[in-house]
């Protein structure tokens, strides 16, 4: 059913050769505390934008970007693709209401990694970047930022870590990159004053300066202009995309963290402050009482808390974690096995998330969390086909403060392999939606819900 509703994969080079469209950014260089959500943009907006970077072109494992139109009206997408080798390509897509369409940049361009910029005629279109292995996803961004952080990268033998940076503006962007490791802070000369031309993409190889190091934190400060960034971690050929965060925070939520036998799960933390960070990780796991895990981090350093395996935490399904710190820190979830890890940054609380099975493999688990101390009501609606153009209410979930609930158990129509697209929304921006893919052991592939950032 699902494949029948989708438009074919966009590979029509012949059509594209006759198309034009250069995407420019109308965003000023800002660093909002919460990235603006494309789902919150008025449907009557004249124009909106999406930016995706770090799309790979590995042979047989091409990454792609999928777009979904949450509105009932057709939207025209002006698409611009740029590669790390400087090649460019432009085309346009007509996207019907409640329809989705994908583009594989490597099919229509030359390069190793790509960025995709899209100008949309109206509001309501969101985009998701999907790795070629179909095991990692991050939302496309709606605007550039002037600060960006991520942590947990490995440059050990058998691993590689890159920062994929795209400049969405019409002038060159200049940035500095800082590094946080267990040994402390560094600011390699080659990472200072980096320039990214207008509407260009650049890959920064962390391994050239941070050699054979585990748990590397990164801070990017943009001196001029703004950027969109994605971290690309490869460990024993397992690639993960990390959306990063626009700012450090004192409280972070990690629902759906696996404690399964054979799995590895760690909370990796970087302290970008002059002050020592005292971190506490609260663990909610079924009926078990788990003593909070703690970590003390020196200024400008990185560290981690083992969740799985950990003799203090039983192997009992999924745990819901809440991280607290006396100073704002940067954190990430590292999951995998003994031989590899995949990185994912925490989801920023919001009031709207789109759940779409873009990979057609279904979900292993799906939950919604109330991050506030007050009760909230979460409304769940489904988008049907572009021909029916119907939005159907399928249920409401009442959550007490701090409560996490399974979408599978509370929404009868939400199945492990959903054939519909779901909008999960609340009146206040205090909600987090968490998703994992079906795997053995469970929970090792975490994917970000589509928030249209």
Image (cartoon, rainbow, N blue to C red):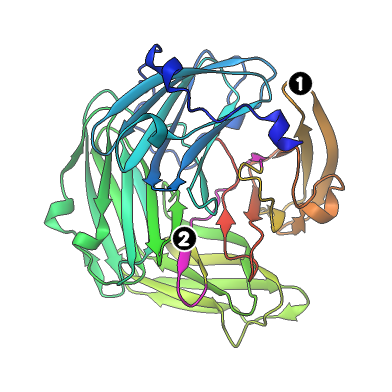
- For disc 1, the marked residue is 389
Q: Where is residue 346 in the image (x, y as percent from the top left)?
A: 53, 55
Residue most extreme to the left: 189
Q: Position of residue 218 (x, y in %)?
A: 32, 57
- For disc 2, the marked residue is 343
Tag 2's secondary structure? strand
Q: Which stretch is magenta?
A: 337-356
Horizontally, residue 120 falls left or right of residue 256, namely left
Horizontally, residue 286 falls left or right of residue 295, namely right
Q: Which of 382 and 12 is in front in this view?
A: 12
Horizontally, residue 356 falls left or right of residue 169, namely right
Q: Where is residue 337 in the image (x, y as percent from the top left)?
A: 52, 74
Horizontally, residue 34 falls left or right of residue 237, namely right
Circle 1 Cα neighbour tier, 10 Å, few/some/many (<14 / 14–19 / ≥20):
some
Q: Can residue 453 be seen in this view?
A: no
Q: In which quarter of the image is the N terminus?
A: top right
Circle 2 Cα neighbour tier, 10 Å, few/some/many (<14 / 14–19 / ≥20):
many
Q: Main secondary structure of the magenta part?
A: loop
């Amino acid at each position: 059913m699902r494949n029948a509703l989708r438009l074919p994969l966009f590979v029509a080079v012949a059509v594209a050769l006759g198309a034009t469209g250069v995407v420019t950014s109308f965003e000023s260089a800002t660093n909002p505390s919460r990235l603006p959500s494309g789902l919150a943009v008025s449907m009557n907006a004249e124009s909106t934008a999406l930016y995706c970077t770090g799309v790979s072109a590995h042979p047989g494992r091409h990454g792609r970007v999928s777009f979904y139109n949450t509105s009932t009206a057709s939207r025209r997408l002006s698409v611009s693709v740029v590669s790390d080798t400087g090649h460019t390509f432009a085309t346009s897509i007509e996207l019907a209401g409640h329809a989705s369409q994908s583009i594989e940049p490597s099919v229509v361009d030359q390069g190793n990694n790509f960025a995709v910029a899209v100008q949309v005629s109206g509001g309501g279109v969101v985009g998701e970047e999907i790795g070629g292995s179909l095991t990692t996803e991050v939302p496309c961004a709606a605007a550039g930022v002037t600060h960006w952080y991520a942590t947990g990268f490995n440059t050990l033998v058998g691993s590689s870590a890159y920062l994929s940076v795209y400049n969405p503006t019409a002038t060159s962007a200049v940035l500095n990159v800082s590094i946080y490791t267990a040994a402390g802070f560094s600011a390699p000369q080659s990472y200072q004053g980096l320039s990214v031309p207008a509407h260009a993409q650049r890959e920064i190889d962390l391994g050239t300066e941070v050699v054979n190091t585990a748990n590397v934190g990164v801070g990017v400060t943009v001196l001029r202009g703004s950027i969109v960034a994605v971290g690309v971690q490869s460990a024993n050929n397992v690639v993960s995309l990390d959306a990063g965060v626009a700012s450090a925070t004192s409280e972070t939520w990690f629902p759906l963290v696996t404690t399964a036998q054979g799995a590895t799960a760690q909370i990796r933390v970087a302290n970008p402050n002059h002050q020592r960070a005292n971190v506490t990780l609260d663990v909610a796991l079924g009926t078990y009482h788990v003593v909070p895990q703690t970590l003390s981090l020196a200024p400008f350093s990185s560290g981690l808390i083992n969740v799985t395996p950990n003799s203090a935490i039983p192997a009992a399904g999924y745990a819901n974690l809440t991280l607290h710190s006396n100073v704002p820190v940067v954190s990430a979830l590292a999951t995998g096995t003994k031989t590899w890890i995949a990185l994912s940054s925490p989801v920023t609380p919001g009031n709207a998330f789109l759940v779409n099975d873009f990979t057609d493999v279904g979900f292993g688990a799906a939950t919604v969390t109330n991050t506030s101390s007050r009760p909230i009501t979460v409304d769940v609606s489904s988008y049907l086909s572009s021909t029916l153009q119907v939005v159907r209410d399928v249920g409401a979930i009442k959550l007490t403060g701090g409560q996490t609930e399974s979408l599978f158990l509370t929404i009868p129509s939400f199945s492990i392999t959903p054939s519909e697209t779901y909008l999960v929304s609340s009146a206040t921006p205090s909600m987090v939606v968490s998703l994992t893919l079906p795997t053995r052991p469970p929970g090792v592939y975490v994917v970000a819900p589509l928030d249209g950032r």
